[in-house]
Image (cartoon, helix red, strand yellow):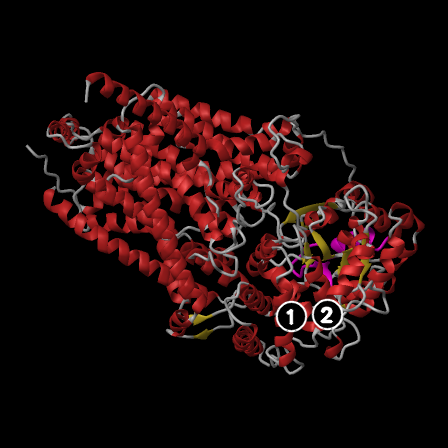
């Protein structure tokens, strides 16, 4: 093939490629953009066919959401997510360190155990927990739900942080030990600071998963700890109830906005986190 | 690392700010005065619809008068039911008042989760006889005398048909040519027969119009649709000895009929949920449909319906061979029950009686989209002023309530029976099974369920 | 010099034991409880009234055609969804491989479907996009004269809808992993093949894919375990319907527990779920860990 023809071929392929990329991004984002628009449409405009592209924006859907005690749900999601992740970190990071640094009998077994918890379907925990928690009287309390949410983040944190710790060479520990540092100091002041990016990534991931969680909240959040995701599904239609489109769209936007913003701001970290999950 | 940490901080700030977004649209709340002797808060769990929406404007007055703060929590039906079951099992006292659908009435009564409010007749002034019989009937369990829920909504299905299409002389001529008898116009004394109804549905299915259409999705509507046909043909799910009778010739005839009728309905009916048939009706895509009372009333309301003025009302079809005197329809609606683990049952009852037992308030609620359970409302002139076509509608509606509406089975496992039946109905309409196969299979399944129920209750 | 450290369990325990205790309480104990409950015939509302049923529940499960159908649906869903996302994700990674202006922005935007709560995604698709009469998808199809199906309420479209949503939200995940893996791949074998005249797709098939074997395998396992336990999307979109046609195992357990109140039976089903995924994972992972252990 002559050079000119080859160049043109490459050029066209490149343009095609870019077009496809744009299409892919569009398909990925379309649902969200659509709902974002929908959340500002008045009930009359909302579900009209053909779809209304130019419309008079209104905040009425958001005020409906506000009057449905939305802040209560938002607060709950926030408290439960942050507290459970914080607890998981406090317990899981040391565990990851221990598993990384110490050669212990049964280390493999423990790692396998942690991994297997990650792979279990949540329903197998949820039903028994419902019974256990009702007997203890902690259904619907923050404490109960937060504690249960640890299932979501702890195995992940242990697994990922161990990988991050593993990548910090022993020589660092050695040097510190030679300088007379205790085990704990090695952990706290040497190895951990080297792994802060990893920790940040793991925190972000855990927060996202906790925020998005549904099944546990559905069964275990009682009245006082209901999270945003549970609140949302109250408004689906069903027998004798009409679908509340406006409310659904506005509520959806408020659930995803914090997470989407966070994802965009720390995107590199986030991506590293997701790819890291498959690290083995 | 510092950069990432500060980024995280920024994010937490942003997250909290997003919580402010809805506040921008939020209206200012009115200050409420509290009576010092009651600082009580009660929670009402009910279905999200206009009915419960329109309760909200009254809450401030109630709180001002009694000091009781009422929180109305609206849910979808499934959501509410699941949540309720979980909360009862956990014994949490979450709800003081819950919407009591006949669908789960049995379970709640058998497990002792709700209170019998007939006791409040003497103590808190519950005037039972002020209410429509059907409104009390909807909260009855089996043949008991207890009243398990405060009257809230009682209605049944009435047929809606396009008067203009039926009265059109060309249609009448064509119909007579095709079927050999006059196009029937239904009256109270002479309702449609099942044969006429099927012929009409067939006749009007042409172009982009269908003869009939009604929601049939899921367990709720799957069952709500097929059960009245079974009743109309003279059969029941089970007899007084709890033996399943559904696969009798009458039962099979009912399902065969329904399967044929399905050919004259839009294909999507198996997925239609509450209210989804109305837009089709308004757009002229259905010649006939059916609806609960308020849907029937809306159909002739020029503000809501594009075909207002052209909608006729009729009672559901009658099947002469059934041996019954009329067709049968499901008694629908529900009541509001007070939970056994409520911490403020009297406050709860006070609210219910204040709101629904008081003629002025109930009337105002009805005029704004509520329901009418007090007899007095049907005589109020305001109703006929606001909905002039009610004059035509109420005789049909009330007749249906008194003679045609029938309470669904309320035994604790009814929901499982409904699940089985609606699954079978879907399967038959998708031609996966023949009516006979489906009913035979279903009857064994239902009998197992009922036997299990009897064993559980030590019967 | 390798720093050999023989730390006794005592010292290590402070670091590790708290996690183990917590995991035991919130994960292991419930799992054991579920297994135990599976042997009894108990009722949600009357947990005290129960009779020992031994293996009866488990036997019942395999005679229950709703449960068996649920197994089948879960298997079908997982198979189609995992295969589609893997292939699509890989192809997209190839598409994105060569750097271009705005690549990072594009990748950033593509992470958005992944971080949205599955419930919200499912809801958006169900209510706004796939609604048969007023949804965007059917309107779009109608522009081409195609009459869109009743997505949520008919078979097989209900299952297809659920799969579509799952693909929409999981493909970016696979894509990111593949893209990262591609970017650290060594160039030499590829360049050598190019010089030898191998075409693009030949290069992909014979060189790139084999070198990514490990990553692909792990992503596969990961995807299987996520899809297999899917609850949020199915429950929100179809509740398992129409007529149980999209009832994945998680939804089955939930429905049986909350609708028929047979807690023992529901738990037995959950235990079967657990056994299946446990065995599957062990079969795949154990040999790999062994191998890694040898190499370490």
Q: CA distance from mark 1 to mark 2?
A: 9 Å
The answer to whether residue B335 is left or right of residue A51 is: right
The answer to whether residue B342 is left or right of residue A136 is: right
The image quadrant that residue A90 belongs to is top left
Counting from the top left corner in percent of width and height, residue A141 is at 53, 47
Position of residue C148 relative to residue B9, above or below, is: below
**Label placed on residue B209:** none
The quarter of the image holding the C terminus of chain B is bottom right
Q: Residue at x 12, y 41 (%)?
A: C296
Element carrying mark 2: helix
Magenta stretch holds residue B354: yes
Position of residue A189 relative to residue B142, above or below, is: above
Contact, CB < 8 Å: mark 1 with mark 2? yes
**Label placed on residue B257:** 1
Element carrying mark 1: helix
In the displayed orientation, state which residue is furthest to the bottom: B241
In the displayed orientation, state which residue is furthest to the front: B177
Magenta segment, which residues? B329-358
The quarter of the image holding the N terminus of chain B is top left
Position of residue B346 relative to residue A162, above or below, is: below
The image quadrant that residue B293 belongs to is bottom right
Assess disc 1: are there few (<14), some (14-19) or many (≥20) residues with their C-alpha within 10 Å of its C-alpha: some
Q: Earlier in the sequence, mark 1 or mark 2?
A: 2
The answer to whether residue A248 is left or right of residue B199 is: left
Q: Residue at x 62, y 37 (%)?
A: A49
Q: Chain of mark 2?
A: B
Q: Which residue is mark 2?
A: B194
Q: Nearer the viewer, residue A67 or B420?
A: B420
Q: Chain of mark 1?
A: B
């Amino acid at each position: 093939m002559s050079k000119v023809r080859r160049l043109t071929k490459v050029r066209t392929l490149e343009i095609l490629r870019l077009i496809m990329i744009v299409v892919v991004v569009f398909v990925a984002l379309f649902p969200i953009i659509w709902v974002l628009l929908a959340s500002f449409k008045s009930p009359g405009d909302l579900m009209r066919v053909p779809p209304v592209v130019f419309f008079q924006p209104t905040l009425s859907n958001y005020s409906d959401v506000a009057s449905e005690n939305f802040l209560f749900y938002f607060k709950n999601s926030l408290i439960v997510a942050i507290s459970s992740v914080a607890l998981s970190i406090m317990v899981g990071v040391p565990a990851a360190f221990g598993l990384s640094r110490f050669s212990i009998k049964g280390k493999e077994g423990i790692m396998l155990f942690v991994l297997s918890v990650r792979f279990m379907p949540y329903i197998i925990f949820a039903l028994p927990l419902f019974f256990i928690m009702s007997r203890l009287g902690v259904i619907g309390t923050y404490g109960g739900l937060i504690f249960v949410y640890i299932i979501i983040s702890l195995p992940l944190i242990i697994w990922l942080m161990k990988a991050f710790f593993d990548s910090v060479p022993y020589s660092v520990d050695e040097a510190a030990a030679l300088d007379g540092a205790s085990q704990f100091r090695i952990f706290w002041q040497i190895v951990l600071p080297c792994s802060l990016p990893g920790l940040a990534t793991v925190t972000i991931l855990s927060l996202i998963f906790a925020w998005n969680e549904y099944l546990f909240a559905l069964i275990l959040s009682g009245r006082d700890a209901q999270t945003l995701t549970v609140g949302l599904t109250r408004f689906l239609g069903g027998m004798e109830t009409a679908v509340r489109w406006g409310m659904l769209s506005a509520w959806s936007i408020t659930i995803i906005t914090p997470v989407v913003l966070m994802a965009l701001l720390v995107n590199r970290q986030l991506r590293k986190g997701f790819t890291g999950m498959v690290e083995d | 690392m510092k950069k990432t940490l500060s980024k995280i901080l920024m994010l937490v700030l942003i997250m909290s700010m997003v919580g402010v977004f809805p506040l921008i649209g939020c209206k200012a709340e009115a200050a409420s005065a509290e009576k010092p002797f009651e600082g009580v808060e009660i929670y009402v769990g009910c279905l999200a619809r206009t009915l419960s929406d329109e309760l909200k404007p009254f809450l401030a007055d109630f709180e001002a008068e009694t000091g009781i703060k009422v929180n109305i929590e609206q849910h979808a039906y499934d959501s509410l039911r699941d949540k309720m079951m979980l909360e009862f099992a956990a014994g949490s006292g979450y709800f003081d008042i819950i919407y009591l659908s006949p669908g789960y009435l049995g379970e709640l009564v058998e497990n002792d989760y709700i209170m019998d409010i007939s006791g409040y007749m003497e103590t808190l002034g519950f005037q039972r006889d002020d209410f429509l019989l059907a409104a009390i009937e909807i909260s009855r369990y089996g043949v008991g005398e207890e009243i398990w829920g405060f009257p809230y909504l009682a209605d049944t299905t009435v047929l809606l048909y396009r008067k203009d299409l039926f009265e059109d002389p060309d249609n009448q001529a064509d119909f007579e040519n095709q079927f050999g008898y006059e196009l029937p116009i239904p009256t109270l004394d002479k309702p449609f027969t099942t044969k006429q109804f099927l012929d009409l549905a067939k006749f009007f299915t042409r172009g982009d119009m269908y003869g009939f259409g009604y929601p049939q999705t899921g367990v709720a509507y799957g069952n709500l649709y097929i059960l009245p046909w079974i009743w109309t043909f003279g059969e029941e799910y089970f007899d007084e000895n709890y033996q399943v009778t559904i696969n009798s010739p009458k039962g099979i005839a009912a399902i065969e009929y329904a399967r044929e009728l399905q050919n004259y309905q839009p294909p999507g009916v198996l997925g239609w949920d509450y209210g989804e048939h109305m837009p089709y009706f308004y757009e002229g895509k259905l010649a006939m449909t059916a609806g609960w009372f308020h849907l029937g009333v809306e159909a002739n309301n020029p503000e809501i319906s594009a075909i207002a003025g052209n909608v006729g009302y009729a009672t559901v079809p009658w099947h002469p061979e059934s041996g019954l005197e009329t067709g049968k329809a499901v008694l629908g609606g529900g009541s509001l029950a007070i939970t056994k683990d409520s911490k403020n049952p009297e406050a709860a009852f006070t609210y219910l009686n204040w709101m629904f037992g008081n003629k002025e308030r109930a009337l105002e609620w009805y005029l704004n989209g509520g329901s009418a359970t007090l007899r007095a409302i049907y005589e109020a002139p305001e109703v006929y002023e606001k909905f002039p076509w009610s004059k035509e509608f109420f005789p049909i509606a009330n007749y249906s309530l008194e003679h045609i509406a029938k309470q669904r089975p309320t035994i604790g496992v009814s929901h499982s029976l409904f699940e089985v039946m609606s699954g079978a109905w879907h399967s038959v309409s998708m031609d996966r099974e023949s009516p006979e196969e489906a009913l035979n299979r279903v009857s064994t399944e239902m009998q197992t369920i009922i036997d299990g129920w009897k064993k559980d209750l030590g019967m | 010099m390798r720093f050999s450290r023989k730390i006794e369990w005592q010292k290590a325990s402070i670091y590790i034991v708290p996690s183990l205790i917590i995991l035991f309480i919130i994960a292991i104990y419930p799992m054991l409880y579920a297994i135990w409950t599976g042997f009894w015939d108990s009722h949600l509302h009357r947990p005290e009234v129960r009779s020992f049923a031994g293996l009866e529940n488990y036997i019942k499960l395999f005679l229950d055609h709703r449960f068996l159908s649920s197994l089948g649906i879960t298997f079908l869903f997982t198979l189609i969804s995992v295969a589609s996302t893997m292939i699509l994700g890989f192809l997209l990674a190839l598409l994105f491989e060569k750097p271009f202006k705005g690549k990072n922005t594009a990748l950033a935007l593509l992470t958005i479907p992944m971080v949205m709560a599955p419930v919200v995604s499912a809801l958006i698709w169900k209510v706004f996009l796939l609604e048969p009469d007023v949804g965007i998808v059917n309107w779009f199809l109608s522009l081409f004269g195609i009459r869109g199906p009743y997505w949520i309420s008919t078979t097989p479209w209900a299952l297809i809808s659920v799969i579509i949503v799952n693909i929409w939200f999981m493909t970016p995940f696979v894509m990111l992993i593949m893209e990262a893996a591609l970017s650290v791949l060594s160039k030499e074998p590829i360049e050598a093949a190019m010089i030898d005249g191998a075409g693009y797709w030949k290069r992909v098939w014979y060189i790139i894919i084999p070198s990514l074997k490990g990553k692909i395998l792990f992503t596969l396992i990961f995807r299987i375990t996520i899809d297999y336990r899917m609850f949020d999307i199915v429950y929100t979109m179809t509740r398992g319907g129409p007529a149980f046609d999209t009832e994945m195992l998680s939804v089955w357990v939930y429905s049986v527990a909350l609708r028929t109140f047979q807690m023992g039976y529901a738990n037995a089903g959950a235990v079967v779920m657990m056994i299946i995924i446990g065995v599957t994972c062990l079969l795949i992972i154990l040999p790999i860990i062994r191998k890694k252990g040898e190499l370490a």
